[in-house]
Amino acid sequence: MSRLHYKELEVNDVVMADQAYGSYIDLALIQQQKADGVLRGSSMKGDTLGQPLPS
């Protein structure tokens, strides 16, 4: 799914995406449309949830 399609989302739509679209940016863009997303994160990115941001 191209990010260009996010603007077509309606309230309460649910987007399911594989690891190619598993970024926090994609989730934020989906949530801007008042939709929800289930995104599989990439195993190459590592687990950064709850980790401090690099300085």
Image: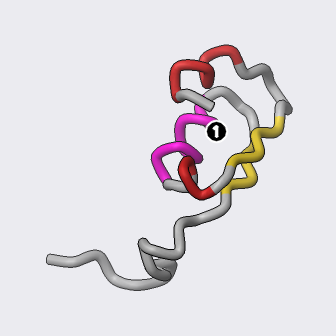
Q: Is 39 placed left or right of 23 in the picture?
A: right
Secondary structure of the residue carrying tag 1 is: helix
Number of numbered discs: 1
Residue 46 position (above or below residue 25): below
How far across and down, in percent of the image, does residue 23 sit? 50, 54
Find the residue positioned furthest to the top: 8
How far across and down, in percent of the image, does residue 43 sit? 52, 75
Q: Is 2 placed left or right of 11 in the picture?
A: left
How far across and down, in percent of the image, does residue 50 sit? 48, 82
- Crowding at dot 1, Cα within 10 Å, few <14 / some 14-19 / many 20+, comes out as some
In the rendered image, which residue does mark 1 sit on? 31
Location of residue 44 by image quarter: bottom left
- Which quarter of the rendered picture does the N terminus lie within? top right
Location of residue 33 by image quarter: top right
Magenta includes 43? no
Residue 22 position (above or below residue 47): above
Give the residues in magenta.
24-32
